[in-house]
Structures are given as structure tokens and as C-alpha cells.
Image: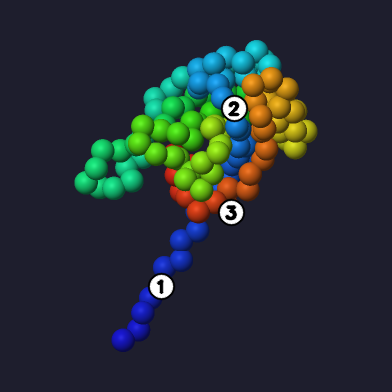
Amino acid sequence: MNKTTLKFELDLDFVLVAITTQLKDYMFCFKTNKQLGTNFCKIADLELPFNTDEEPFYFSRYFFLLPESETELYILANKGTEGFLVPEMKKVDFFLLIQNYIHAEDLKGIINGLNKIPEVLVAVEVDPKKLKSKENLIF
């Protein structure tokens, strides 16, 4: 009997920045807005069903659209109601997910700006293709 194998590859067309800080999500967004001149606003929590027979997990989410472009920025809390969005990165508190095109210099400016916030321990770009739970970042 012949077997047919379906190969499925996720389209990871976004940039991911991991952020470690002691701040709560609303205070982190407030300080980010002041530092970067952005206007992140809270939107509906990201809902992930990890098991079909259990309640889904919820992760705090903030959104900002760069003016004069279609670049979308999301701040996602890594710690949710019952677990982690990306369990292999438990020391990370937030992710900045940037969808659509962003120029390398603009990305560098954002990361440098985040690192200038006194309460941010580190903000660094992460390759989403190397994460085991990368499918949790697709919404």
C-alpha cells in the first residue's frame, strides 16, 4: 500500500523581538509608547485552545499600526491565564511581533529604543523558525 505524505510549512512572515522586563503589560506599553512615540492600544486577548476538552488560554495583546505603512506591531504577553505562549522561552515576558515589511534600520531603532527603557532587561530579535511552538504566534 502506498503512503502519501503531506508536507506543511508555516509561513512565518514576521519579525519577532523577545523582551524581558518586570513591568505589567499596561505599564510596559505605556513606557514603550513614551519611548518609541507609538500608540499601542489593548485589543482582544489572543485565545489559544491547547486541548480540545479544556478551556483555552488567553494572552494579553496590544496593537499599533505604523503610520504611512501597512506594518502592524503587536505586543504579546508570554505568560497567559494558564501557561506560556512560547513555553521554551519562559524567561521572556513579552514578544513584539512585527507583521509585513519593516526596514532593518527601523527594526534596529525599535530594539535600541526598547533597551533604553530602564525596566527592560533585554530586548533582542529572535528567529521564529527556530521555536518549537512557532504556530502559537500565527493569528
One can see residue 99 in this view: no
Q: Are marks 2 and 3 in contact (CB under 8 Å)?
A: no
Q: Distance between the residues labelled 1 and 2?
A: 43 Å
* Between discs 3 and 1, the one toward the N terminus: 1
Q: Which of 127 and 94 is in front in this view?
A: 94
Q: Is residue 108 left or right of residue 71?
A: right
The residue singled out by tag 2 in the image is 21
Q: Label 3: few (<14), some or many (≥20) within 10 Å? A: few
Distance in Å between CA atoms under marks 3 and 1? 23 Å
Q: Residue 82 appears at what percent x and percent y?
A: 35, 36
**Farthest residue in the bottom direction?**
1
Tag 3: amino acid = Lys
Which residue is painted at 44% across and 40% down in the image?
Answer: 84
Q: Is mark 3 on a helix, strand or loop?
A: helix
- Give the residue at x 68% y 25%: 114
First of labels 1, 2 by sequence position: 1
**Colouring used for the render:** rainbow
